């Protein structure tokens, strides 16, 4: 098991989310950065869908109360095991009583703690992902005990590590394709849509708002389906990019749709970071 000594700013349990529930108004939820979380599970020989701990903006501290192998992927928050610096994208053994902690941010917004066999929290609608209104809680708290699988008798030589993942966090380009209302934009609006934008302070698991304004003379639409990665153009001319906890319907024009890779990239951005939509 793992004991939460300090939950940090915002930490939760997430897997790849819950599917087939949108008809009931239930968001997909799940890890914000699927690329990083699946990388950690792959390095541990887990299923890619196994639940992980998602730590947003660091500062968390966890104690291993039993032996297990683990891996840190995603953002680098100067992670340490028993006060000794450790690397991302490399498998370590957390022995009983050892403490994993996170400190100063180097890059990224979200880091992932994958453990061998995954985090075995309660399943709700076939997913372990925390989600507002769906699970009893949306974030971890001090003193929480997280169940993990019994560690299999692997040796370090059975695992691998990867390097060169850091560039992923400094890429400002977000791959996308036209949304259902894209063709309602005029030529000037379309040109504005592919300028450089700045992430606002209003960004979280539900959505990311953009600071800059696009001229908008479009009418609102009938409430229609939206997805994680849907880029909505609000009446004020500001853009909202829906993320994993975003609603399942909306009435703002859907001008773009991000790829899954782009959603993961965006999830590692923070306030004042630059982004640019790139049409595929």
Image: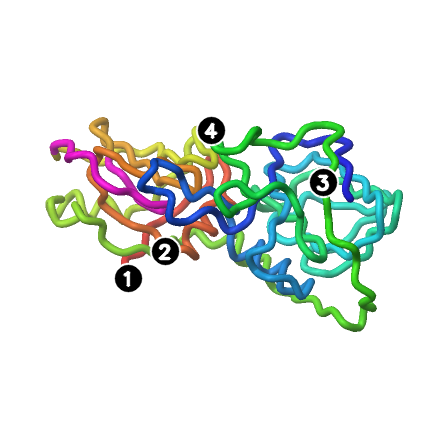
Mark 4: secondary structure? loop
Percent across and percent down for residue 179 are 22, 49
Circle 3 crowding by C-alpha within 10 Å: few under 14, some 14–19, many from 20: some
> Separation of disc 2 and disc 3 at Cα?
32 Å
Circle 1 crowding by C-alpha within 10 Å: few under 14, some 14–19, many from 20: few
> Separation of disc 1 and disc 2 at Cα?
10 Å
Numbered circle sitting on residue 146: 3
Whichever of labels 2 and 3 marks the residue nearer the N terminus, that label is 3
Magenta segment includes 39: no
Whichever of labels 4 and 1 marks the residue nearer the N terminus, that label is 4
Read off the residue under disc 2: 259
Read off the residue under disc 4: 133
Say whether marks 2 and 4 touch (CB < 8 Å).
no
Tell me the residue at 77%/57% (across/down): 69
Whichever of labels 1 and 2 marks the residue nearer the N terminus, that label is 2
The magenta-colored residue range is 219-233
């Amino acid at each position: 098991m793992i004991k939460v000594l300090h939950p940090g700013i915002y930490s939760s349990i997430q897997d790849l989310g819950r599917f087939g529930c949108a008809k009931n108004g239930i968001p997909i939820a799940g890890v914000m950065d699927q690329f990083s979380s699946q990388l950690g599970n792959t390095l541990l020989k887990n299923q890619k869908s196994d639940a992980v701990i998602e730590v947003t903006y660091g500062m968390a501290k966890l104690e291993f109360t039993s032996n297990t192998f683990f891996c840190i992927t995603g953002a680098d928050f100067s992670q340490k095991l028993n006060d000794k610096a450790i690397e991302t994208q490399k498998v370590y053994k957390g022995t009983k009583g050892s403490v994993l902690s996170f400190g100063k941010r180097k890059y990224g917004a979200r880091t992932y703690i994958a453990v061998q066999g995954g985090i075995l929290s309660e399943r709700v609608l076939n997913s372990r992902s925390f989600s507002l209104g769906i699970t009893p809680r949306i974030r971890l708290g001090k003193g929480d005990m997280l169940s993990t699988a019994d560690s299999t008798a692997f040796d370090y030589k059975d695992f691998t590590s990867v390097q060169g993942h850091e560039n992923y966090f400094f890429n400002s380009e977000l791959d996308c394709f036209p949304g259902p209302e894209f063709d309602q934009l005029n030529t000037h609006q379309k040109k504005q849509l592919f300028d450089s934008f700045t992430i606002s302070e209003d960004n979280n698991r539900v959505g990311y708002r953009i600071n800059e304004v696009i001229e908008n003379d479009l009418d609102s639409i009938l409430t229609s389906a939206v997805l994680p990665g849907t880029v909505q153009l609000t009446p004020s001319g500001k853009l909202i990019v829906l993320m994993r906890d975003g609603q399942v319907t909306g009435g703002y024009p859907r001008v773009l749709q991000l790829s899954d890779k782009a959603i993961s990239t965006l999830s590692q951005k923070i306030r004042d970071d630059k982004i640019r939509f790139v049409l595929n």
